[in-house]
């Protein structure tokens, strides 16, 4: 007899088939709000979480839950402390979306380098201003700084070096120096990244240590021609400070796949800025990444079901 697996949001058909073929029952949720999930979680053994938040209320309502799998590389939306207290395993998919997010970073770098938001706003009504008078630059020969150089940061570094002839600096206090990709200049002082780089790309997970750890002080260190890219989590950046830095030309531009509030608030003044390119957290939304994430979720559940050591436990859940 398989497990009952709650899907607050649907997953790729390949992963559904994988789980059904192994005797599990898939239960589609009635909604992704906290109250709906708290109701749906009764009698459920496992759950795959996409964009829904899983606070303590949901954990406390669970009566049979053994494992939560986060359909992606971030897990800040799950109350891991509440899960830990209840002995519920929390897994994630740290490698499923790496290629897609890295490609999104390159897209944002290119869009910012060509002043895409302003150019796109102008080109139908004022073609020659859009073409000739909006500032633009090349990536070739520029220096990119990678903040947190895990799987995604390493892929970005590789694409920058090999694809665009860029120099790469990286800061990651948790990564042994001898494990960085050859050709990367590793720095111990993060301020070197802000002071010296033409592009800065952030790949930090959201923790209490990284919450808004980039703000006014860091933006003022940057070159006025520098471009800031964030594809990690909106809350690692002080958004008001970023807005002021872009509005007042403290930095040249920003490319953002994430904001502090998601879904986005259309009243957010950052949308009014011509030197900011914003995408709706699409880094991991490709067909390939979505399928990989769903399959990794399904495989994680099957590993726990069979009593095996899961491949991708969230840090801190290795022995739970």
Image (tube, rainbow, N blue to C red):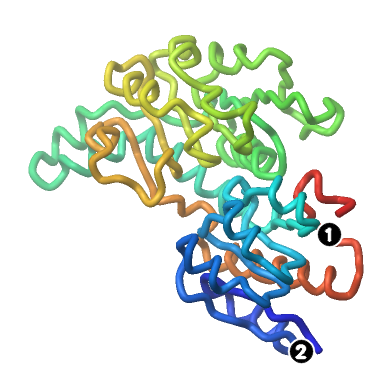
Q: Position of residue 21 (x, y in %)?
A: 74, 89
- Disc 1 residue crowd, few under 14, some 14–19, many 20+, Cα 10 Å: some
Instruction: Between residue 67 and residue 266, name the one nearer to us.
Output: 67
Q: Residue at the location (72% across, 68% down)?
A: 65
Q: Which mark is residue 216?
A: none
The residue identified by callout 2 is 23
- Image point (71%, 17%), residue name: 187
Chain-order first, disc 2 or disc 1? 2
Q: Give the spatial CA distance, label 2 vs label 1.
A: 21 Å
Q: Which of pointers 2 and 1 indicates the residue nearer the eye?
A: 2
Q: Nearer the viewer, residue 171 or 199?
A: 171
250 to 283, vertically: above or below: above
Q: Report the side of 5 relative to 141 (left or right).
A: right
Q: Quadrant of residue 2?
A: bottom right
Quarter of the rendering containing residue 93: bottom right
* Crowdedness near tag 2: few (<14), some (14–19) or many (≥20) residues, C-alpha within 10 Å: few
Q: Is residue 288 left or right of residue 182?
A: left
Q: Nearer the viewer, residue 207 or 252?
A: 207
Q: Residue furthest left?
A: 125
Determine the secondary structure under disc 1: loop
Q: Does 176 appear above or below 27? A: above
> Residue 315, relative to residue 63: is it above or below?
above
Q: Secondary structure at mark 2?
A: loop
Q: Which residue is mark 1?
A: 311
Q: Quadrant of residue 145?
A: top right
Q: Is residue 249 above or below residue 9?
A: above
Q: From the top left corner, tell me how far across and down residue 284 is, in percent.
A: 54, 56
Could you tell me which quadrant the N terminus lies in? Answer: bottom right
């Amino acid at each position: 007899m398989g497990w009952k697996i709650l899907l607050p949001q649907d997953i790729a058909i390949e992963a559904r088939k994988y789980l059904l073929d192994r005797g599990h029952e898939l239960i589609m949720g009635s909604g992704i709000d906290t109250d709906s999930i708290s109701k749906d979680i009764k009698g459920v053994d496992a759950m795959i979480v996409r964009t829904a938040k899983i606070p303590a209320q949901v954990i406390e309502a669970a009566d049979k839950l053994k494992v939560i799998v986060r359909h992606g590389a971030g897990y800040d939306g799950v109350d891991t402390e509440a899960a830990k207290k209840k002995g519920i395993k929390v897994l994630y998919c740290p490698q499923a979306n790496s290629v897609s997010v890295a490609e999104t970073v390159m897209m944002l770098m290119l869009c910012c380098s060509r002043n895409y938001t302003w150019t796109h706003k102008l080109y139908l009504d004022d073609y020659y201003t859009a073409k000739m008078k909006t500032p633009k630059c090349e990536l070739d020969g520029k220096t990119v700084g990678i903040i947190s150089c895990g799987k995604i940061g390493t892929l970005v570094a590789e694409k920058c070096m090999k694809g665009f002839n860029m120099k790469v600096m990286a800061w990651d206090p948790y990564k042994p120096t001898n494990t960085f990709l050859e050709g990367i200049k590793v720095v111990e002082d993060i301020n070197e990244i802000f002071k010296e780089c033409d592009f800065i790309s952030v790949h930090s997970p959201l923790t209490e240590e990284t919450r808004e750890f980039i703000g006014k002080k860091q933006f003022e260190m940057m070159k006025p021609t520098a471009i800031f890219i964030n594809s990690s989590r909106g809350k690692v950046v002080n958004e008001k400070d970023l807005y002021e830095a872009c509005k007042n030309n403290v930095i040249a531009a920003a490319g953002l796949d994430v904001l502090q509030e998601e879904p986005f608030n259309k009243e957010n003044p950052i949308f009014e800025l011509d030197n900011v390119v914003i995408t709706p957290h699409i880094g991991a939304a490709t067909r390939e990444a979505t399928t990989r994430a769903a399959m990794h979720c399904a495989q994680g559940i099957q590993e726990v079901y069979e009593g095996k050591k899961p491949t991708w436990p969230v840090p801190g859940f290795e022995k739970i």
